[in-house]
Image (spheres, grey):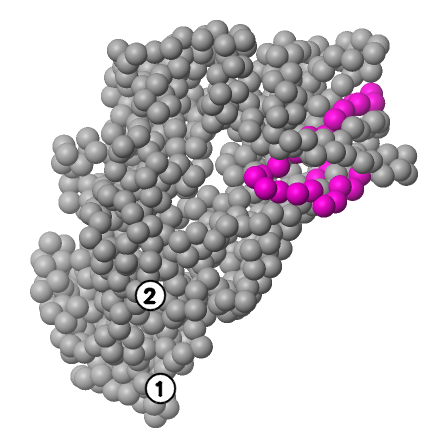
Amino acid sequence: MRIRSLVIGIGVVLGLILGANVVKADGFMIVEPRPVYQPWLKQPTPLSVKYHHVTVTINDNIATTTVDEVFLNDFDHEIEGTYIFPLPAEAAVTEFAMYVNGKKVSGQVLDKGQARKIYENIVRQMKDPALLEYVGRNLFKASIYPIPAKGEKRVQLTYKQVLTYDAGSYKYVYPLDTEKYSPKPVNDVTISTKINSKIPIKSLYSPSHNISSKIERYKASAGYEAQNVKPDKNFVLYYTVSDQDIGLSLQTYQQNSEDGYFMMLLSPGQLKSKASAKDLIFVLDTSGSMSGEKIRQAKEALRFCLSKLNSDDRFSVIGFETNINIYKQSLVSANDNNINKALEFVDQFEASGGTNINEALVKALGMIKWSTRPRMIVFLTDGEPTEGVTEMKDIIANVKNANKNKARLFVFGVGDDVNTHLLDKIAEDNRGACEYVDPGEDIEKSVSTFYSKINEPVLADIKLDFGGIRIYDLQPRVFPDIFKGTQLVLLGRYNGDGNRKITLTGYVNGRKKQFFYEAKFTREDSSNNFIPRLWATRKIGYLTSEIRLRGEKKELIDEIIKLSKKHGIMTEYTSYLVMENDQDYKRYGLNEAMAPKLKEAGNKFAQAMKSYTGSGAVSSARNIQDMQQKALPAAPELETVKYVGNKTFYLQDLTWTDSEYTQGMKTIKIKYLSQEYFALLKASPELGKYFAVGENIIVELKGTVYKIM
């Protein structure tokens, strides 16, 4: 019986051999029509998926993954097919559950040699290379008949694998990638992970997806869920285990004799030890614009913060409008008596007068004395400066000069009337952070959530020594303090290789302390191919912030364009920068209909970057923060850009072209689906994931350029 089309994991596609689309994911099903010709198969037609749920349990380094998905047949015809699941390396299937007419269906595991023949056979018959990305992997295979008309078929698969401990952490990968231009989104996708460890768990981090997570010393959990989405990348999760107070893990990527990229995680996890005592001043805007619900919520937020002070902390409170009102001129101990008096002081705040930001911050910073404790200012305002010094550049300079004892300044901007350039700049210059609260958003919830993160500092004034290896282009450029339950994700470039001793220095409970770790900076290691793009995303975020706060400079713009094109990072602002002429449109493979839309979005974002106030200014500030802090960006919604590992391909003249390729490079030409084509895949299976991009492709691998045509 001839294979006519595919059902891939979280999607089903029916169609003729020459016309069927391939939809990629974690498992898939080859659907075979009955011998009688069915005219309804003339066009590729998607079947829907009810849900796709993944449950992961990791005990020490043994991961058990259960996949549970339901396919729906919306047609009036039975479907016969074969379910196939490309297995992760070293994975062993322990259970497969699917029932047909009350009987359990069995399956078989095929090694990578047998699997390659099946993939190649499908590719030849479908004349679609999409499955080639799985070449080199084992697969699980089970025959399924019938999938009833207007019915559903539930598939459950469980497999186990041993996770490898490397440089302080374990890495778990679930193959969640799918063809991002599949006809229909997935209705429901969830991944639930639980980890148990004999060694304390320090951190959980996903560079691929934004997850919810919780760590309880020897146990941890992480979750991801989405509805109506088209998954376009694998789910990757790192967790660090360590007996040290501060856990450290190092992941690297280096290829083709270029300088390497690294990602370092630093985390104290859930330490049982006492949090470091801190010096803290709360500075609250009580001007007339804060009247009504805003001042009520802000006072409630301040009450929460005061109630959470630790007994060894020292603090004070400042309320400001035209005048400056100070609870205590010098910091006092956070005992019950002082906290109760401070609460009474806060109760007296009323919204009136102007906004004297300069004097309030200069006074607060003058009250901070040098000590080995963490030193912090928490500052909340909803408007622009209207009293005293009002020029932005003067306020920025005055605040920086007043901060002689290096306090960290954490800023909350409430509503759309704040001067985002001013708030971001004073936070950046004073080693802090800025968060924005939307109009109508609960101020109390936003402030209390943030304060809970910084309430228990563990390691302050961090310094790192990398053991003689040259490190550059660090993101973030200034290290924040590390707080209980948080982690520092550090990305950068390196030159050199080998085993190195990394020294972490900081202050714990006011005392200088050093931690020592052994780590390896690798050569020719491409296993962590997400790191270059994650680093580039954060670097572009930093450069965009520099332009927003300090103005456009040619070298900054050129660097953004270079990184954007190499790594395929299309943001609103990068589209504004690179879409200058027809040649740029062609570079990104944009047609005439798509290019103006990107240009318009880019123009709006560029204008918002230049605005100090308003919803656009707040939105641009948040977007830039996201680039500097969050996981990998989603693939661009362009039909002409594709990401594969660390490579970016642009559709140019109907050919998918590697961004590393330049005209004039020596090229080996190979005919698509020829004997030479499959012989090359057998010799170099790593090419499969690139050949899967399309029929016509130019790809560079280890200094050799291949053109498939």
Q: Residue at x 66, y 43 (%)?
A: 92
Q: Residue at x 37, y 67 (%)?
A: 246
**Residue hosting label 2:** 482
Picture quarter with the C terminus = top left
Residue 618 point in image, percent of width and height: 32, 48
Q: Position of residue 543 (x, y in %)?
A: 23, 41
Residue at disc 2, secondary structure: strand
Instruction: Confirm whether residue 623 shows in the render.
Output: no
Residue range corresponding to the magenta coloring:
69-98
Tell me which corner region of the image, top left, top right, bottom left or bottom right, holds residue 322: bottom left
Q: Is residue 93 magenta?
A: yes
Q: Position of residue 63 (x, y in %)?
A: 60, 52
Circle 2: residue type: Ile
Quarter assignment of residue 396: bottom left
Given contact means CB atoms under 8 Å apart, are the residues at marks 2 and 1 in contact? no
Quarter of the image containing the N terminus? Answer: top right
Near mark 2 (Cα within 10 A), the count class, few <14, some 14-19 or many ≥20, is: many
Q: Nearer the viewer, residue 522 or 231?
A: 522
- 431 vs 13, left or right, is left
Q: Is residue 518 magenta?
A: no
Instruction: Classify 401 as above or below 308.
Output: above
Q: Nearer the viewer, residue 459 or 149?
A: 459
First reached walking from the N terminus: tag 2 or tag 1:
1
Identify which residue is drawn at 30% across, 67% down: 515
Relative side of 116 to 429, left or right: right
Task: Give the structural element (helix, strand or loop) at label 1.
Answer: loop
Where is residue 501 drawn, in percent x and y? 28, 58
Mark seen at residue 311: 1
Query: Which amino acid type is shown beneath numbered disc 1?
Result: Ser
* In this rendering, position of residue 661 left or right of residue 428: right
The Cα–Cα distance between marks 2 and 1, rounded to whole angstroms, is: 20 Å
